[in-house]
Image (cartoon, rainbow, N blue to C red):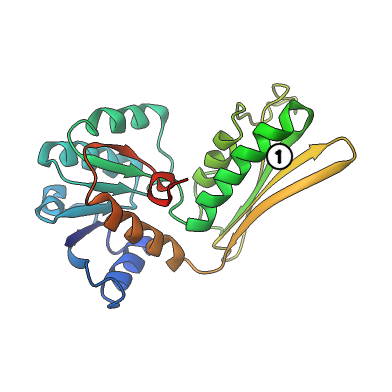
């Protein structure tokens, strides 16, 4: 299967190309890639497209995937609720998979967070701490927001007075050094605290997860999917 990588010279793009050329994925082959300024149509000569770029570029790729009826994997962060609706609409014409984090471990963590929040209930306050390298632009990260969504509670950042809606999920953000990504979800209850967390030590785990999703999505009908579908969670 021929794989195109949008933004193939970016940090994640280079990792994806390296993995595709490693020999560890015999069913997949690197076909082509783009950089800013290229015509994105060239990506859709391949069998499947992987996109870890920017929201502006991803918006073009979503509708080109629908136009060409080609499977598209999206790992871009910073997308809006309107972008998610665009994905749902486009997925009527192509298989489309979106995840704010392609790590197998993080997606398992999200499933555990969902179970814990449901069983612990409103008596437990929930806080999410995330740490990334100093180049990370979005804050909170897409992964932190994904974990917040898994709690089933509204997400809220403090306003200028330092207050927020009761029962909402709080976020704390740290940026520094070359940290790949760390996330801790804390449940604060009467007399105890429960912590669920994940630490990424190697960026290649995101590329490996994306390629696992690529293999899975190639056989799926039109629709919008996530890594939890890939993992059967």
The residue drawn where x is 75% and y is 24% is 161
In depth, the one of 116 and 151 nearer the eye is 116
- The answer to whether 63 appears left or right of 138 in the picture is left
Residue 150 percent coordinates (x, y): 56, 37
Which quarter of the picture shows residue 198? bottom right
Extreme residue in the right direction: 191
Q: Is residue 66 above or below residue 136?
A: above
- Please tell me whether mark 1 sits on a helix, a strand or a loop: strand
- The answer to whether 193 appears left or right of 153 in the picture is right
Residue 26 percent coordinates (x, y): 23, 72
Q: Is residue 185 above or below residue 207?
A: above
Residue 71 percent coordinates (x, y): 21, 46
The residue drawn where x is 69% and y is 34% is 119
Q: Is residue 160 above or below residue 45?
A: above
The residue drawn where x is 37% and y is 61% is 12
Residue 173 percent coordinates (x, y): 64, 47
Extreme residue in the top direction: 165
Task: Give the residue number, with chain letter if any, for mark 1.
Answer: 127
- The answer to whether 182 appears left or right of 25 in the picture is right
- Neighbor class of circle 1 (other Cα within 10 Å; few <14, some 14-19, many 20+) is some
Extreme residue in the bottom direction: 23
The residue drawn where x is 77% and y is 46% is 194
Q: Is residue 110 visible?
A: yes
In depth, the one of 55 and 74 nearer the eye is 74
Quadrant where the N terminus is found in the figure: bottom left
In depth, the one of 59 and 151 nearer the eye is 151
In depth, the one of 183 and 56 nearer the eye is 183
């Amino acid at each position: 299967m021929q794989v195109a990588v949008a933004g193939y010279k970016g940090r994640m793009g280079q990792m994806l190309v390296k993995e595709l050329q490693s020999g560890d994925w015999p069913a997949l082959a690197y076909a082509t890639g783009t950089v800013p300024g290229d015509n994105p149509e060239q990506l859709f000569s391949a069998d499947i497209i992987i996109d870890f770029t920017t929201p502006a570029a991803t918006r073009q790729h979503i509708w080109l995937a629908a136009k060409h009826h080609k499977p598209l994997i999206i790992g871009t962060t910073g997308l809006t609720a309107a972008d998610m609706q665009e994905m749902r609409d486009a997925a009527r014409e192509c298989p489309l998979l979106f995840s704010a984090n392609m790590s197998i471990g993080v997606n398992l963590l999200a499933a555990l967070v969902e179970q814990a929040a449901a069983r612990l209930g409103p008596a437990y306050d929930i806080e999410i701490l995330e740490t990334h390298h100093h180049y990370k632009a979005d804050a909170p990260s897409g992964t932190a927001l994904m974990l917040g969504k898994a709690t089933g509670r509204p997400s809220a950042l403090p306003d200028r007075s330092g207050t927020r809606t009761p029962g909402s999920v709080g976020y704390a953000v740290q940026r520094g050094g070359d940290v790949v990504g760390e996330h801790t979800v804390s449940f604060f209850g009467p007399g105890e605290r429960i912590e669920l967390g994940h630490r990424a030590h190697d960026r290649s785990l995101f590329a490996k997860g994306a390629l696992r999703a690529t293999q899975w999505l190639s056989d799926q009908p039109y629709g919008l999917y996530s890594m939890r579908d890939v993992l059967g969670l």
